[in-house]
Amino acid sequence: MSEKCIVLFSGGLDSTTVLAYALSQGYDVWPLTFLYGQRHEVEVAKSEKTLEKYGLTERRRIFRMDLSLYSKCSLTNSELEIPEYDPSHIPTTYVPARNIIFLSIATGYAETIGAKKIFIGVNSVDYSGYPDCRPEFIEAFNKTISVGTKQGCESKIEVVSPIMRMSKCEIIRLGTSLGVDYSLTHSCYDPTPEGLSCGVCDSCRLRLEGFRQAGLTDPVKYR
């Protein structure tokens, strides 16, 4: 029997690549999606088509929470403008402690279903400087759950970040080799009501540059 794993799956480029990677490694994948009041929930809606492609629609679990109290975050406060790409500082799209929250919930779910691994699509190469996307964070979190959970103490539970040290170009090439349909993914933080990507936010600019470096055309539509 294949080993169970949880994949944190938003429907974005990175998490879709990680989903395909986990499947290619023979894992019994259980997708976990978070709805936390993010303004780009269109990625979650689009993710349904990817789950249908892999036959995982019934497996996916959605965890809902309200993070609107994080009022200084432009992803959860629609009154704030989404900033254009600026690599000199961490943008307001940073959601305070998001991956600490997500991975804590995923760890509890892993214990519930007996999964030993939690896959997450964090990346510390072509990224916005979020502190919870770095190797140091994943290493520290793994130490925490190894001593702070029943399964961690008795057997094993581990967060895995397979694209951590890849460039966006390398991630796209990996996903393409695994048959990922990137037209089904969404990355933009500030899409139009019709779901078109803005092309100027951090996420869009990193995505577009990744496709350019990979010698490919981004299949999603931009306004």
Image (cartoon, rainbow, N blue to C red):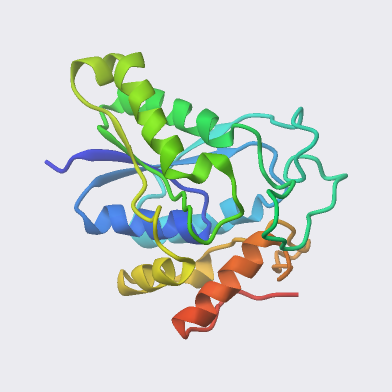
Q: Quadrant of the N terminus?
A: top left
Compared across the picture, whether 149 is left or right of 93 comes to left
Q: In the visual, does 113 lie left or right of 80?
A: left
**Position above or below: 182 against 102:** below
Residue 112 in the image, given as x and y percentages of width and height: 33, 22
x 84%, y 52%: residue: 81
> Toward the viewer: 164 or 80?
164
Q: Which of 179 and 51 lies nearest the eye of the viewer?
A: 179
Any part of residue 162 in sight: yes
> What residue is at 48 percent from the left and 66 percent from the top?
168
Vertical side of 176 occupied by 155: above or below: above
Q: Quadrant of residue 106?
A: top left
Question: Quadrant of the rendered structure where residue 167 is?
Answer: bottom left
Identity of the residue furthest to the front in this view: 88
> Does 91 sit left or right of 63 as displayed?
right
Q: Position of residue 190 (x, y in %)?
A: 74, 58
Q: Quadrant of residue 152?
A: top left
Specify whether residue 112 is in view.
no
The x, y position of residue 120, in whole percent, is: 41, 45
Which residue sits furthest left?
Answer: 1
Query: What residue is drawn where x is 28% and y is 14%?
Result: 150
Where is residue 87 shown, x and y percent of the image? 67, 60
Label count reads: 0
Task: Quarter of the image for the C terminus: give it.
Answer: bottom right
